[in-house]
Amino acid sequence: MSDTTVFTPASTPESAGIPSQAVRRFVERLDTERICMHGFLLVRHGKVAAEGYWSPYSGDSMHRMYSVSKSFVSLAVGLMVDQGKMHLDDQVVKFFSDKQPEQVHPYLESATVRDLLMMATPHNSTTYTRTDKDWAWTFFNKIPSHPPGTIFSYDTSATVTLTTIVERISGLPFLEYMRPFLLDPIGFSPDAWCIQCPEGTSWGGSGVICTLRDMAKVAWVCMNGGRWGSRQLLPEGYVQAATSKQIDNSLGGNRGYGYQIWREKDNGFAFRGMGSQLAICYPDKDFLFACTADTQGADLNKEGGRRGILDAMRQELYAELSDAALPANPGAHRSLERKIGTLTILPQDGARKSAMAGRIDGTWYAMADNPMGIERMRLVFDGDEGTWEYTNAQGDNRLRFGIGGMVAGEFPQRNYFGPRIGTAPGTPYRCLASAAWVEPHKLDMLIYITDHYLGSLRISMAFKNDEVSVLMVKAAEWFLDEYQGFAGGAVAGAQH
């Protein structure tokens, strides 16, 4: 396959050995299970067999990839090893004389680049917290628990440390270092970027922001031994090692781990990011499945979410792959294209109307002390939309929501992180908000944060006589903390 034909569209899914009906069943199943998908991409034999996005996302959307970023860092390390700028058996302390304590613990002193790539550090968990000012420093100053290179323990500070090494040697953000060798030749988005750690290095453990196609292209290069068409962009030996089992992690129900890359069923391997950012490669089938989503809440509940996506992919797509092209099926293909053209993030499920709406419309409720610090709140209805107004420590806030549909806007809180962790730019995050009546007296609200930080907030408001009960549940890393818990209140001025 020539460089220019890689990732061009297949004429139909059938021409790539995937039935259009199977792709439609896959998409319909995701919506039936109400999984918050953002996009999916199927690549077979180097051709894009099918692609779709749930509005307002599109193929041009820059999307947070979370821990998929770790796999990118691994490839940057591989390039440096190939260029002789570092070695897998280098002790990591040699790169950090400025961040070590006076007496380095022997476990840390012996830890190698290879150990960190395998998530076999001497630490039992990630060493930094959101309040630490220098995340790489914490790796060398937290007391370790066991010898390195022995047991798998998922440790994002390992990737932070590897990223720092790459950036210290290259003098560039790691994505910029990779551009001439890998990213530019495959058409990786020039405006892709990475959130920074507090100390200013790239947050290679979680911060890459790029398109779904960008992620899939990098994975496809790995599935093809480091090649893009006829060009060898990554060292073949390193890619083979990175995507192979280097350490056992079956205690956590997994199938092995390479160098910042997960092993999967059927000789597969994957880039995995929180919230179901996924690129799963099956070299034996020449098949790549990639998707973006926000399933953080579902993943916490162990229902739907990433498990639901993987089950649907395995049962509706992987099981239907044909080794040869399938007969054309124009009707099924047109049906699939119509379905893909109407994909949209689903709003809160429930009734659009309730008699309760007229009784509470515009009524202020004074709230008792609560974990959210909300002093008062009210709902104002306007046809198929509404506004939630509330006062908290920040002041007066307003959030517009749809009823039976999503409304795009900005979440009122303004004290969240931006391009660098630890620094709040003071601007709100973009969001989608909807509400519906799940019982005649109970309105549930569903809010998705759709910015460079992804998350969700679910709110249940139950009304009884002149009283209200509120429950808020958030699923977001390091924000929306002010929106978690129960609250009670009564119509302002009512006697109790």
Image (cartoon, grey):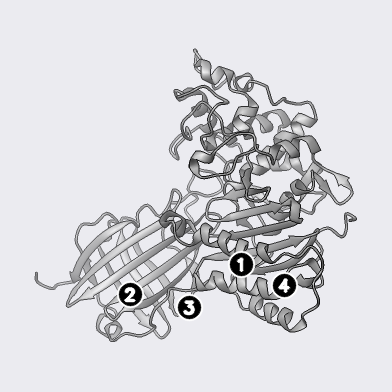
Residue at 80% across, 30% down: 83
Asked which secondary structure carries label 2, the reply is strand
Give the quadrant of the N terminus: bottom right
Which residue carries the number 1 mark? Answer: 57
Dot 1 surroundings within 10 Å: few (below 14), some, or many (20 or more)? Answer: some
Amino acid under label 1? Tyr
Point out the tag, 2 or 4, that comes first from the N-terminus: 4
Q: Are marks 1 and 3 in contact (CB under 8 Å)?
A: no
Residue 19 — which label? 4
Amino acid under label 2? Leu
Q: Quote the CA–CA distance across marks 1 and 4.
A: 25 Å
Amino acid under label 4? Pro
Point out the tag, 1 or 3, that comes first from the N-terminus: 1
Asked which secondary structure carries label 1, the reply is loop
Residue 261 — which label? none
Point out the tag, 3 or 2, that comes first from the N-terminus: 3
Point out the tag, 1 or 4, that comes first from the N-terminus: 4
Which is closer to the viewer, label 4 or label 3? 4
Residue 443 — which label? 2
16 vs 211, nearest the viewer? 16
Amino acid under label 3? Gly
Give the quadrant of the C terminus: bottom left
438 vs 452, nearest the viewer? 438
Q: Quote the CA–CA distance across marks 2 and 4.
A: 41 Å
Task: Give residue 10's position: percent from left, percent from top.
Answer: 81, 68
Which is closer to the viewer, label 2 or label 4? 4
Residue furthest toward the top?
103
Can residue 21 be seen here? yes
Residue at 68% across, 47% down: 267
